[in-house]
Amino acid sequence: MQLKVKPMGAYQTNCYILSNNGEDFIIDPGVDATSWVLKNVKNPVAILNTHGHFDHIWSNAEIAKELNIPIYCPKDDAFMLEKDPFGYGTPKSKASVLVKPDQKIKIGKSDFTFWHFPGHTPGCSVIEFGNIWFSGDFLFEGSIGRWDFPYSSAEDMAKSLQRVKNFKENRQLLPGHGGSSTLKRELRHIDYWINVVINS
């Protein structure tokens, strides 16, 4: 297993390439990710989106067409790929597979779970591969995703933060922005963030 990461665009959104068993998976290809992705994949299998915000899905369509690979997106965020709800001129794409909440799914030779943690977006998910969590904009190093955007929900975010406390096994945390962390490290601050969200 190998991992490559590069922050993309003005929001420095982490685009990941996970290589496993001779297959490459592209996670959250943001703004201008295409050229970097094309240079760093040998046997691309799929694009995986943690959620539907423009800075995570900007290069979906271009890469999917160039490499002839499917897009996997949480079903509750699929509308963001197709409709550009924030009006940023995001190139429109269409999810090939609508992933259900908490769905375990085999893609190529690899097993993934899309853990559903809504709040930042309706479909916001953490993509689990082995002991790795690609946490998108749910959990960051020392912080959490915003809950004040259109289609965000403070109530859902508080519930998701409460739920993540039930995950007892440690995970390597690879977020959508910033540096890596571990689930154990971030869980130390979850009660603090729950109070912040509830009282916002």
Image (tube, rainbow, N blue to C red):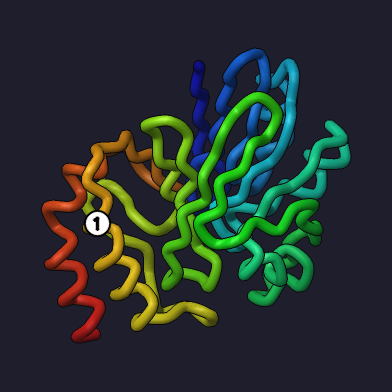
Residue 25 x %, y % = 64, 31
Residue 70 x %, y % = 79, 43
Task: Determine crowd level at label 1: few under 14, some 14-19, many 20+ residues with C-alpha closer than 10 A.
Answer: few
User: Which is more toward the observer, 115 or 198?
Assistant: 115
| Rendered-image quadrant of the C terminus | bottom left
User: Which is more toward the observer, 178 or 94?
Assistant: 94
In-image side of 145 versus 97 (left or right): left
User: Which is more toward the observer, 103 or 93?
Assistant: 103
**Location of residue 166 by image quarter:** bottom left
Residue 65 x %, y % = 87, 41
Residue in view at x 25 percent, y 44 percent: 183
User: Which is more toward the observer, 181 or 123?
Assistant: 123
In-image side of 188 versus 172 (left or right): left
In-image side of 56 versus 129 (left or right): right
Residue in view at x 69 percent, y 65 percent: 78
**In terms of secondary structure, where does tag 1 sit?**
loop
Q: Identify the residue under disc 1.
A: 166
Q: Amino acid at mark 1?
A: Asn
Residue 167 x %, y % = 27, 50
Q: Please identify the residue farthest to the bottom as the structure is shown.
A: 199
**Location of residue 29 by image quarter:** top right
Residue in view at x 51 percent, y 24 percent: 4
